[in-house]
Image (cartoon, helix red, strand yellow):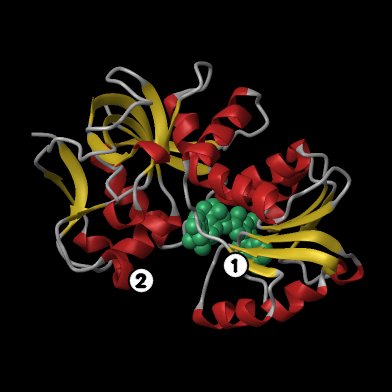
């Protein structure tokens, strides 16, 4: 039987188990993928902790992991875009995670063909950051060349890819990160790097067409003050208070990773054209994944994405 990381109740790192699970035929519109690489996102442990149990429900065991790349094993009825043997990358449904597994399942609309020159590891690492960058910058902000973008957390998993896409779209980019990541931000091409841990706050003198808060550390009222008259504040870390703020301030746009065929294809195109590349600094086999997830969850600083490789 194949194995995966799963849990039988919501909770801390201790509830994660590496256990066998039953393979099923993919449902109509779904694809079964033999996973080769799966990238770790903070959302993975937030889901396991039960932070979104209103949406994820009480059915156990539940798999973990959303971003993956691998090879199609089987397709459900009505799947026309993919066939067994295709090399793909994608995102599982939020309600049905399970990418830290030998075989995972998702909708055909949450997948794209993996670009030939891109490794499984790099494709998996770009999935959620890529979708958020495309959705935020091109769809919500309609970013145009010459516009000014602030990426809060510009060297993080999401921030790095948002920064790369904004630069490729011709934006002037400012970015915040900690002092230890300033050189990485400069290497990415960020025009104006601000270390958030030095006490300096030169940002209030600037105005941005887009403030993309990936770190989730900006206070909405302060973020709005950084905007030009028509600027938009993109926020991927929703809280009840931020939702309330966004209802009364339409330029505060809360976005969630919502994969679609078009968005996944745009991520694939950006990868093919080398416009985006998520830095992967740690890879471990599935047998060591629980230890790595635990240390990231407990705040181990990371200078790039962490990926689980699955034979
Ligand atoms: N809505 C969604 O669908 C969605 C999807 C993916 C992720 N998220 C959320 O988005 C957040 C970021 O995800 P991620 O994968 O990019 O995490 P990550 O790789 O841990 O990156 C977070 C970044 O925030 C930076 N940071 C921390 N404190 C900061 C501060 N005070 N000011 C500016 N930057 C600061 C960190 O940089 P330094 O270490 O240099 O400080 C780090 O690079 C997580 O909370 C995650 O749950 C939401």
Q: Quadrant of ligand 1?
A: bottom right
Q: Position of residue 36 (x, y in %)?
A: 33, 28
Q: For this view, does 240 lie left or right of residue 62?
A: right
- Which residue is under mark 1? 216
Residue 237: percent from the left, percent from the top? 54, 67
Find residue 48 and report its image quarter. bottom left
Q: Which residue is pictured at 51% across the width and 59% down the height?
A: 256
Q: What residue do we see at 44% from left, 35% from top?
A: 124
Query: 286 or 88: which is nearer to us?
Result: 88
**Does the beta carbon at disc 1 come under 8 Å from ligand 1?**
yes
Circle 1 residues within 10 Å: few <14, some 14–19, many ≥20: some
Q: Is residue 34 above or below residue 176?
A: above
Name the secondary structure under disc 1: loop
Residue 73 place in picture, x, y as percent: 23, 25
Disc number for residue 51: 2
Instruction: Give the Cα distance between marks 1 and 2.
Output: 16 Å
Label 2: state its secondary structure: loop
First in sequence: mark 1 vs mark 2: 2
Residue found at x 38% / y 21%: 87
């Amino acid at each position: 039987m194949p194995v995966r990381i799963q849990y039988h109740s919501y909770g801390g790192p201790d509830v994660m188990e590496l256990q066998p699970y039953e393979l099923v035929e993919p449902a109509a519109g779904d694809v079964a993928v033999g996973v080769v690489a799966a990238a770790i996102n903070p959302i993975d442990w937030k889901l396991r902790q039960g932070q979104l149990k209103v949406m994820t429900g009480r059915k156990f065991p539940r798999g973990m992991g959303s971003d993956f790349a691998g090879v199609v094993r089987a397709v459900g009825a009505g799947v026309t875009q993919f066939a067994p043997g295709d090399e793909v990358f994608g995102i599982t449904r939020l309600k049905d995670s399970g990418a830290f597994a030998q075989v995972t399942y998702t909708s055909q609309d949450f997948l794209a063909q993996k670009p030939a020159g891109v490794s499984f590891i790099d494709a998996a690492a770009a999935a959620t950051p890529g979708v958020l960058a495309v959705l935020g910058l091109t769809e919500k902000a309609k970013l145009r060349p010459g516009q000014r973008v602030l990426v809060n957390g510009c060297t993080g998993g999401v921030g790095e890819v948002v920064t790369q896409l904004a630069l490729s779209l011709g934006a002037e980019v400012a970015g915040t990160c900690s002092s230890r990541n300033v050189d990485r931000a400069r290497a990415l091409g960020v025009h104006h790097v601000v270390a958030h841990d030095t006490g300096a706050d030169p940002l209030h003198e600037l105005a941005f067409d887009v403030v993309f808060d990936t770190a989730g550390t900006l206070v909405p009222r302060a973020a709005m003050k950084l905007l030009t008259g028509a600027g938009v504040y993109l926020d991927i870390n929703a809280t009840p208070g931020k939702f309330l703020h966004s209802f009364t301030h339409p330029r505060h746009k809360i976005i969630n990773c919502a994969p679609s065929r078009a968005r996944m294809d745009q991520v694939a195109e950006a990868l093919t054209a080398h416009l985006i590349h998520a830095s992967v600094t740690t890879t471990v086999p599935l047998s060591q994944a629980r230890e790595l997830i635990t240390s990231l969850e407990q705040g181990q600083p990371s200078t790039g994405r962490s990926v689980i490789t699955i034979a």
